[in-house]
Amino acid sequence: MSSSQLRRFPRRRTSVGASRDFVVHVLKEWQLTDLIDDIELCASELATNALLHGVPPGREFAVRLDLMDDLVRMEVRDSGDGQPEIQHADESSCSGRGLFLVGELAADFGVDHHVVGKTVWAAFKRPATP
């Protein structure tokens, strides 16, 4: 069984919330409510990173969810050339924890580079069905 959902978002702050809403809607549609909290948080972090570091003015970013037999893969693609890297934020830092959180919550994550832009992805194991 496999299925995919994709939505594009404009370069606006409100797009982060809209991307979270999209992820929640799709996961509910797929009846994967156990994964909502983790994937919603990771989508929020990656969408924020795309806006702050990846999407040039006048461009969009895309969020894609792929449903596979044993996992859900969530991707955020942008057209920027920024290189995602895990920051080592201290207790007083207000930012810099996004990719660290993604790495802790996802079973796996990474970056695919394209001629223009990149895709940052995270894979989440589906709960076992009885």
Image: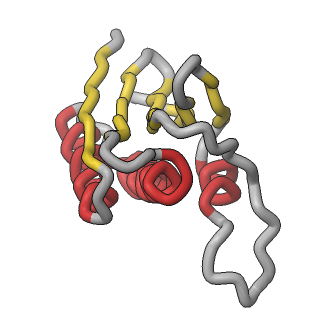
Q: Residue at x 64, y 36 (%)?
A: 109
Residue 18 vertical position relative to residue 63 in the rendered view, above or below = below
> On the rendered structure, is 2 left or right of 22?
right
Q: Residue at x 32, y 52 (%)?
A: 11
Residue 42 vertical position relative to residue 96 in the rendered view, above or below = above
Q: Residue at x 65, y 54 (%)?
A: 99
Q: Pinpoint residue 82: horizontal percent, then vertical percent.
A: 63, 44
> On the rendered structure, is 49 left or right of 91?
left
Q: Residue furthest bottom?
A: 92
Quarter residue 68 falls in: top left
Q: Residue furthest top?
A: 1
> On the rendered structure, is 41 left or right of 12?
right
In which quadrant is the N terminus drawn? top left
Q: Pinpoint residue 103: horizontal percent, then vertical percent.
A: 68, 49
Q: Nearer the viewer, residue 43 or 8?
A: 8
Q: Residue at x 50, y 21 (%)?
A: 70
> On the rendered structure, is 5 left or right of 35?
left
Which color scheme is applied? secondary structure
Q: Nearer the viewer, residue 39 or 129?
A: 39
Q: Nearer the viewer, residue 52 or 120?
A: 52
